[in-house]
Amino acid sequence: MNSEHSDGLAHFAVTIISKDRPGIVADTTEVLYRLGCNIADSSCTMLGGDFAMILIISHEKPFTKARLSDEFRALHERTGLVVHLRSLHEDELIKQPDDGELCLISVYGSDQPGIVYRVTRLLADKSVNITDLNTRLIGTKEEPVYVLMLEAILPAGMTVAATSEMLEPIRRELNVEIGVRAITPVSL
Amino acid sequence: MPAQKILTFPHPILKKRAHRVERLDESIRGLIEDLIDTMREGPGSVGVAAPQIGVSLAVCVIDVSGSRHGKDNNHGLLAMVNPEIVAREGAAVMREGCMSVPDYTGDVERATGITVSYLDEAGVERRIDASGFEAVAIQHELDHLDGILFLDRIVSLKTGLFRRKSYK
C-alpha cells in the first residue's frame, strides 16, 4: 500500500468466504460505499464452490470498528454473508521493500501430502518471501495431480538458478516438477 | 534542457492520441534531447514518449542497451519521430510497469518481433527490425503515442491461471 495515502485513516482487514453466487462483491462493497470506506487493497477469487474476499479498507478518523461491525451484522441478516473484521495497526500498513528478483515457482506432480509444506518451509528458511500463492488439485480420481503456483521475492543477491538448485532435493524426494522463472516487472 | 517531470495518470494527455510531427525542426530536436535526458534520469528507464513529459507529439526515445533484458539485442539509442509498426510476429507475455502509472504492474502480451518505420532526429526515413525486449519497449512507447496505457492491455489477473473448467 502506498503509505502516503494512509495518513489520518483508520484501517481494517475484512475477510469473507461464502458459497459462491453472483452479487457477493456488490453486496459487500455497497455497505462500504455507503459508509464512505476506501478499498485500499483487495484480492478476491473463487475457491472451490466458495468465493473468498480479502480487503484492506480505510476510513477517515474518527471511525470505529464497532460502526463497521454493526453494518456488517445488518449485511449478514440481509444476505447471509459472514464478515470477519480486524483493526490494522500502523506498522501493518508499511509494505516491505522488495528489491530482490521476483520469480514464479511452479510445482506439480502426483498428489501427495506435504507438497505445499515442504516447498514453502524451504523457501521460508532461505528468507524467500511469498507474495502470491495458489494451489489446485487436478487430474483424475485414479491419478490426482497437485499444482502449486507461487510468486516470491528472492532475497537480494539470490539468483533464479540458485533457487532452482536449492529446490533440487524436494524435486527428487517428492518426484515433482519444479520450475523457477524470473518475472520481475520491466520498467518502461 | 534538463530532465523533465514524468506525468502520471490521470493527466489527460496520456489518454490522447499524439499529433504527427509535420516539420522536423530544431524544436523537435530539442524535444528529443529532453526525452533522452528524462529517460537517463528515470531509474531503469528504457524509454520515454513525448506525451509523458506533456508534449502531444508522436516522438519517443528508446534505449534498452543498459538493461539486462536488452543488453545483447538492441539498436542502441533510438529516437523515433512519427513511428509506425508495419509488421509484427509472435507473442509473449511480460510483466510491465510504467513510470506514468506508479505502483502497479501487470502481464501484457506483445509481439516478439516487429518492423518499425520512423524518421530519425535528422529527418531520415528509417526502418528497423526489433525483437525481444527492445520490441516490447518500442511497442510500449508507441502505445503512449496512441493514448494507450499498459493497463489497457493487461491480459490476465495473476491468479487467473488454472481456473477454467472449460475452454472455448
Image: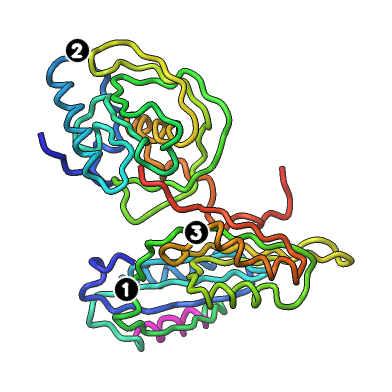
Q: Chain of mark 1?
A: A
Q: Chain of mark 3?
A: A
Q: CA distance from mark 1 to mark 3?
A: 26 Å
Q: Chain of mark 2?
A: B
In the image, residue A35 lies in the stretch drawn in magenta: no
Q: Amino acid at mark 2?
A: Arg
Q: Main secondary structure of the magenta part?
A: helix
Left or right of B24, for residue A162: right
Q: Position of residue B107 (x, y in %)?
A: 49, 48
B139 and B78: which is toward the camera? B78
Q: Residues within 10 Å of mark 2 (few under 14, many from 20)?
A: few
Task: Looking at this view, name the residue that lies furthest to the right.
Answer: A142
In the image, residue A75 lies in the stretch drawn in magenta: yes
Q: Amino acid at mark 1?
A: Ile
Q: CA distance from mark 2 to mark 1?
A: 50 Å
Name the residue rendered at 48%, 45% in the picture. Answer: B154
Q: Which residue is mark 3?
A: A159
Instruction: Name the quarter where the N terminus of chain A is drawn.
Output: bottom left
Q: Which mark is residue A94?
A: 1
